[in-house]
Image: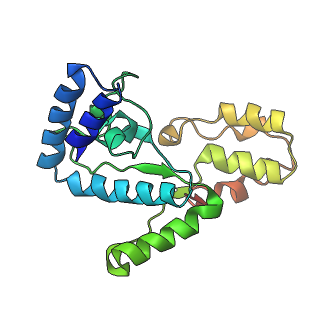
Amino acid sequence: MCSSDLEQGRRQGNCSSSEYAERLTKELAILRQRGLGPYLLVVSEITDHARQQGIAVAGRGSAAGCLAAYLLGITTIDPIRHGLYFERFVHSRRTDLPDIDLDIPSDRRDELIGWAFRHFGEEKVAMVAAHQTFGKRAAFREGLKALGMGPTEVNRFAEQLPQDDVEEVNPVPLHLLTEPYRGAAPLILRLVGTYQHLS
């Protein structure tokens, strides 16, 4: 499928250098080795359906470096023209599976998700989410802001906080806070590790 898309691109005056064929051969070998061909075809089916329904969709992230994704219409960025690396998406030594991020307008997202469940079958479709939790800096930013501290003061204090992984060496500099903010620090610290938002 990608090879025919490459030929079609050549007939339209695009993808004409030999670099495209060489890159596609290399990519397809790795995608086959990793068993990722069907994955790209499923994502391509989703993006094709979205466009047929007038739903704006754009593949982004590391998949933009994949020529196969570009040829299948998943992304709109020519990775060779823009000097993007396929290895950011996947390479032969990568142990985890790559993912393809699709940007879809929020007012049409449910429509496309519903179609995917109906089209592929409920037993083959799942929804996943990333749960973002509060680190120390985010907890103090939100907590101090909620207590009425101004943005400039919040930023100044947050910049003084140590990185989360060196807390024992550099504890939170509570002496930099005035009351009532200093007294609220134990309450703010209870936010650390709790749910912040879903993506």
Residue found at x 33% / y 46%: 72
Percent position of residue 24, x then y: 21, 34
**Rendering quarter of residue 17:** top left
**Residue 91 can be seen in this image:** yes
The one of 154 and 86 positioned closer to us in this rendering? 86
The vertical placement of 123 against 139, above or below, is below
Q: Which of 104 and 148 is in front in this view?
A: 104
User: For residue 11, what is the image quadrant?
Assistant: top left
Q: Tell me if residue 109 comes above or below residue 136 in the rendering.
A: below
- Res 36 visible: no
> In screen coordinates, is 60 left or right of 67?
right
Residue drawn at point x = 38 percent, y = 22 percent: 81
Colour theme: rainbow
Q: Is residue 60 left or right of residue 155?
A: left
Query: Which residue is depicted at the point 72% across and 59% down?
Result: 187
For this rendering, which residue is in front, 69 or 162? 69
76 left or right of 37?
right
- The quadrant the C terminus occupies is bottom right
Q: How many labels does the image show?
A: 0
Name the one closer to the observer, 192 or 126.
Answer: 126
Position of 158 compared to 117: left or right?
A: right
Coordinates of residue 21 in the picture (x, y in percent): 19, 28
Name the residue located 30 percent from the left edge and 26 percent from the top edge: 15
Residue 102 in percent (x, y) is at 47, 51
Residue 99, x across and y down, in percent = 35, 50
